[in-house]
Amino acid sequence: MSETLRSDLRTALTAFTGKPLRAAARDLFATLGYASERALDLGSVSHFCKTYDSTGTLLSRFEPATRWLSIQLLFQLTSADIARSSGRQLELIAPDPADLSARAIESYLFFALDLAPPADGKPRSRTDLCDLARALNRLFPMPALVLFKEGDKLSVAITYRRGNKKDRSKDVVERKVTLIKDISLSRPHPGHLVILEDFSLHSLSELRGRDIRTFADLDAAWRESLSVELLRRRAYRMLADWYFWAREHAQFPPDALPDADGKPSLHLIRLLTRVIFCWFVKEKTLPDGRPLLPYDLFDSPRIRELLKDSSPEAGTYYTAILQNLFFATLNTEMDEDGKPLARRFAREGNEDDHMVHTLWRHENQLTPAGLKRLPALLRDVPFLNGGLFECLDDRVEIEGTTRTKEIRIDGFSVK
């Protein structure tokens, strides 16, 4: 992802907390390449429902209008708007009359819907939002993209259509809806930023190897870009690319023996497994709503506040953050009232703390703020009683002597 677009998307998302919904949503879509001056004030929610669903047969079935704070028609995107956004004078291609699958879509509606918390207090499910997006689409002859705002979260719903076999001038709303759900406004997930970038008009053109020239093109590009299978393949490919790069460059302690090819394959797989496990666990929450793993441990701006040198070359994110999380937190029992602290920093130069894998280390790599903040972040992380995060460093007896030697595989428990 380009750093410029990533920064622009973060700015556009955080702006929702201080701007009116219409302005913030239009700015977000403009960042992605979708903009038009064709807009309409829909008035109040009740006025919208009376005007476009006078019988109440569509909208009231899925979401009572009393749970809507506002609804905005952001703009109606036309082919001329797409051409202008691309920076080129495009000649839009008309559908081939002989092609029964061709769709004569001439515009696309972009809506924003501000939702109040559900009456039962439970978060809306994917099904709830998809049903509502389909209902809104059935009100209009052209497709409609719907942006839902729920407190500090955004969701984007794209409802797909197919050509009507009996009436070529109409579309049929499909059951399938692609939903990008729960995009955090205050702290966007990197994965959501990647998906949003792929959704941009520029990225879609690159994906197809040519400019988007029709709304059928746009619809097909959205389907391809947001395909779950495609996203999964991309994630696996990125992991594989990093793994094969790391096999050539990663360095492990001397006792971490390489494979037959002289590469640290086993140790890299173990590291990847630990990181991926943590990445999934951080999406889970405790009963009080807090994440199992603090987001700050995976957020670049926060990491820079914790570490004196957060550059990739320094390697301190692995040693001071991940190793302390793996071995001295996830593999260490939590502190108990009335007992000495189990989770603490090793005492410098203290032999009793040497080779103790359950103590935090690398204080010298942390900023003054990090020395206070990191223990606070790690102290309430749950203890996982499993072998994945067990440090493999060890002290073993030298055969035939009374002496011992230290085996360094993870390279954590040093003085």
Image: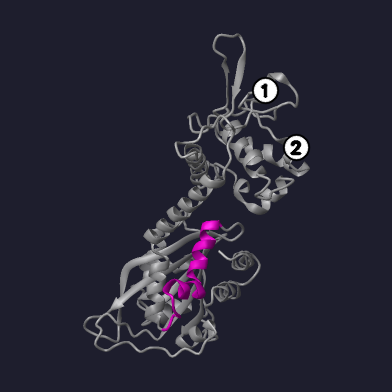
Query: Residue at point 54% right, 41% down?
Result: 292
Q: Is residue 53 above or below residue 151?
A: below
Snapshot quadrant of residue 237:
bottom left
Residues 263 and 335: in front is 263
Q: Which mark is residue 6?
A: none
What's the mark number on residue 354? 1
Q: Main secondary structure of the magenta part?
A: helix
The answer to whether residue 122 of the structure is visible from this angle is no
Percent across and percent down for residue 214 are 40, 83
Q: From what the image shows, is residue 38 above or below residue 252?
A: below
Disc 1 versus disc 2: distance between alpha carbons? 17 Å
Q: Nearer the viewer, residue 119 or 375?
A: 375
18 with respect to 48 (left or right): right
| Residue 190 falls inside the magenta stretch | yes
- Identify the residue position indicated by label 2 in the image: 364
Quadrant of res 25? bottom right
Residue at 61 percent of width and 27 percent of height: 358
Residue at point 55%, 84% (across, down): 87
Q: In the rendered structure, does residue 346 fall within the stretch colored magenta?
A: no
Counting residues from the start of the chain, the first of labels 1 and 2 encountered is: 1
Quarter holding residue 320: top right
Name the outermost residue toward the right.
368
* Residue 208 percent coordinates (x, y): 42, 74
Magenta stretch: give its range.
189-213
Coloring basis for residues = one colour
Q: Dividing the image into 4 quarters, which one contains the N terminus?
A: bottom right
Viewer can see residue 257: yes
**Residue 99: image location, x then y, percent:** 25, 84
Q: Secondary structure at mark 1?
A: loop
Q: Amino acid at mark 2?
A: Asn
